[in-house]
Amino acid sequence: MKTEILITGATGTTGQYAIQHLLNKGEKVRAMVRTIDERSEKLEVQGVEIVKGDFFDSKALNVALEGIKRAYFLYPFQDHLPEAASLFAQVAKEKGVEMVVEMSQMGAELESTSPATQNHVQTESIFNAAEVGAVHIRPGLFAWNYLGFAAPTVADHNTFYYPHPEAKYTIVHPKDIGEVVAEILADKDKDKHLGQSYEVSGSQVYSAEEVTKDIAELIGHKVEYVPVSVDEWIDAVKDHPTINNFLAKHLREFSTEVAEGRFDKTTDVVKNITGHEPRSFKEYIHEYKEAFLPKSVSVMQS
Ligand SMILES: NC(=O)c1ccc[n+]([C@@H]2O[C@H](COP(=O)([O-])OP(=O)(O)OC[C@H]3O[C@@H](n4cnc5c(N)ncnc54)[C@H](OP(=O)(O)O)[C@@H]3O)[C@@H](O)[C@H]2O)c1
């Protein structure tokens, strides 16, 4: 069996989950990684073919896409997404790729005010125009965000600070996104997916109070939710390692979009594509419980 599936962003959150699911399904996978390190070695020992490459290196893209029929385009939360998408789409077209599943975002609409979201809007158009079999994945908020938004202050003084107490949003377990991507890439009936935009949600929508309640139940004692202004919130979270410079620059618009209700919906995409209900926010934070505990407790437990 030839390797016909390429995963980019393969060492990142959703890329890793997509690869694991494809391997579980018995698919052969090639991974494009920016860096050869312990993460790529872990993939290699599982039988994944590794190609080292950068999204802006056309030579590497030519190698990565050689013989590939279906690809996952996962660009990080960084600047220059449309430029990377243009180059990838061009090489994919030349190589005869029949399906590109690309990571977009819930609420990626023309009227969006966030430059980061606008990058996704533009990127969807780039892949549509390139005629490479575009499929758009539009997830809600990644549960992962709360390792940066909530864990540090919960661990430090049992408090979750967030603006927009009235806002509701869906929170998605990244494993569900990876599985949706993998199921689409492996589906023999590709035509039912081409041109689709899949809004991937969790099982419910949450307010900041509800997020706080789940965290409190997880760690077994009271956590207080304190509404703050957007400026106070950005100032508090911008230096956390999970918040890169690009995200920090766009937190204001991003949180405004969340407050406008762009993420306030649930869909049946996870159920329809994977066959199971979406995983819960609680399930995700349970895996990272240590991050929400006071440092002294986590050290004692480790
Ligand atoms: N956070 C949210 O709530 C949310 C919601 C909806 C959509 N999204 C979208 O989800 C995407 C991020 O997904 P994710 O969390 O799965 O990504 P991620 O964990 O940040 O992973 C990014 C991957 O891309 C690789 N990479 C970075 N720069 C590269 C380059 N120049 N060339 C080749 N590879 C490169 C990284 O490799 P290294 O680790 O080696 O750098 C890593 O493997 C963004 O497009 C974001 O807009 C996020």
Image (cartoon, rainbow, N blue to C red):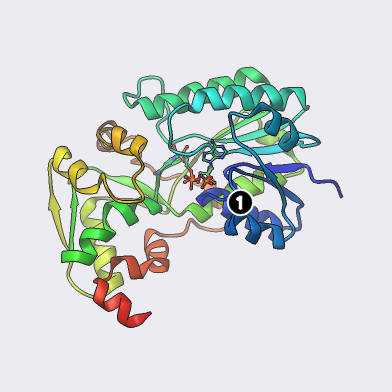
> Label 1 belongs to which residue?
18
Toward the bottom, the furthest residue is 300
- Left or right of 181, for residue 59: right
Toward the top, the furthest residue is 129
Does residue 263 appear in the picture of this structure? yes
Location of residue 120 in the rendering, given as x and y in whole percent from the top left corner? 46, 28
As rendered, which of 13 and 267 lies closer to the eye?
13
- Left or right of 169, for residue 223: left
Label 1 Cα neighbours within 10 Å, binned few <14 / some 14-19 / many ≥20: many
107 above or below 90? below
Does residue 254 appear in the picture of this structure? no
Location of residue 15 in the rendering, given as x and y in whole percent from the top left corner? 57, 48
Three-letter amino acid code at the position of disc 1? Ala
| Residue 181 figure quarter | top right
Picture residue at 40% right of the left edge, 32% below the top: 107
SS class, disc 1: helix
Picture residue at 13% right of the left edge, 49% below the top: 227
